[in-house]
Amino acid sequence: MVDRISKILISNRGEIAVRIIRTCRKLGIRTVAIYTNVDANALHVKLADETYSLGSNPYSYLDIEKIISIAKKSGVDAVHPGYGFLSENAKFAKTVEDSGIIWIGPKWNLIELLESKSRTRLIAHEIGVPIVPGSLEPVSLTEAKKIAEKLGFPVLIKADRGGGGRGIRIVRSMEELERLFDVAIEEIKTSFGSDKVYIEKYIPRPRHIEVQILADQHGNVIALGERECSVQRRYQKVIEEAPSPVVTEEERRKIYEYAIRFMKRVGYVNAGTVEFIRDDQGNYYLIEVNKRIQVEHPVTEMITGIDIVEQQIRIAEGRELEIKESIYRFNGHAIEARVYAEDPEKLLPSPGTVTWVEFPKTEHVRIDHALAPGIEIPPYYDPLIAKVIAWGRTREEARTRLIKALTEFKVEGIKTSIPLLIDVLSSPEFIEGRVHTEFMNEFIRSRMQRKE
């Protein structure tokens, strides 16, 4: 076991930085915040014990050299990367570790190993974890055409690295494949500096189910439940819930076994997520592994009572998991809605200055946020400004409680996605649990047509 962590640098901003600070306070751990000039008045800066400026460049949250310099100057024991930015950057993780500072996440070489989605697919295939039929390595256009012909259209072109839905194209014919192949590559070159893609069979309207994993340095690997993440727009999750309304006890045991088998095979340590899609026949296919904490982790915390950030810190300290068995029984149901600084009609970002905030007073509701009057929402970063999470004894109680909380949540000075979220949660499809990964796009198209 390493010495107890007493000070952590949070190499992130916004609501996730604030969320990490709150757990650190609970544990008596001091925090160091970093910020760019546009974030000088941000809530994570106000709440941290120490703060250091990254300067005027708004993209300095990606400046490894500056962040390491601050980590050394401030004398921290550890770095917590949150999610986004450098959280899955193997070079950053290695630099932290080489500096003698604890990295709160998986080892850099594991991040590097799993950066490639095709490599992840190959490992899963080798150990008998089902994957979507397709290529097991990056392909050229010539190879893609052969595989597509064998699989049958439609197929997906997918970026081998990166995320956020970039580089994904649904292809319904050989002509489309020839036309869109280079388009997808150019997009991922710009976003991820990679030109590698692979091909998968397109599975229509699947559900997106992920399993939360905790793994310590002593070989203990457990699952904390699954999350339903099917309500997505442009492959970005919008509403998540736990447990999934469709996963049966038998399916839960099956996907836990798949997820744990994979994580043990690669030697994963920390809090990660194994992601699956579920077809309408109840078949599951591993699609990727998220190596860091997820935006939607609060729904799991609310039905298990486990603080996942606290577990990350304890694992990084070298402690054994206190819970050695996976969790199959949950306390009620939780649903999370991501609130974006976004025009709910035009679906475009809405940066600006928050002039007033009124938080929900509904019971059993948690708000993860970085909001306060006078806070600037800059145009440079992801427009996520808050997460509203509601717990209920039943799914319906959680759903109605979340709608009430969103109705009470007032943010002035900028536009937010709250009206759209309320509409989605009130839809017959969501009420009945009939969601899938295309549901949100279909819902928005229908909503816009009704308003024309």
Image (cartoon, rainbow, N blue to C red):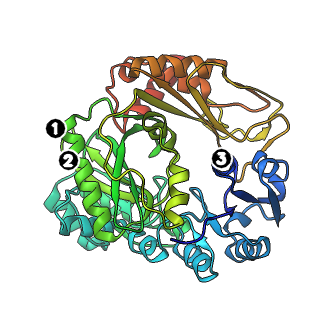
Give how far across and how far down residue 429 sits, in percent. 36, 22
- In the rendered image, which residue does mark 3 sit on? 26
For label 2, count other residues whose C-alpha is less than 10 Å away and answer few (under 14), some (14-19) or many (20+): few
Whole-angstrom CA distance, mark 1 to mark 2, is 15 Å
Instruction: Label 3, secondary structure: give it.
Output: helix
Q: Nearer the viewer, residue 416 or 186?
A: 416
Question: Could you give the CA–CA distance between mark 3 and mark 1, rounded to whole angstroms?
Answer: 44 Å
x and y, in percent, of residue 309 in the image: 55, 51
Residue at mark 2 to residue at mark 3: CA–CA distance: 35 Å
The residue carrying mark 1 is: 281
The residue singled out by tag 2 in the image is 254
Q: Height in image: 377 above or below 311? A: above
Marks 1 and 2 close (CB-CB < 8 Å): no
- The kind of residue on which mark 2 rests is Lys
Is residue 202 at all visible to an observer of this figure? no
Q: Amino acid at mark 1?
A: Gln
Residue mark closest to the camera, 3 vs 1? 3
In what element is the residue under mark 2? Answer: helix
Of 329 and 404, nearer the camera is 329
Q: Is residue 156 above or below residue 363?
A: below
**C-beta proximity under 8 Å, tags 2 and 3:** no
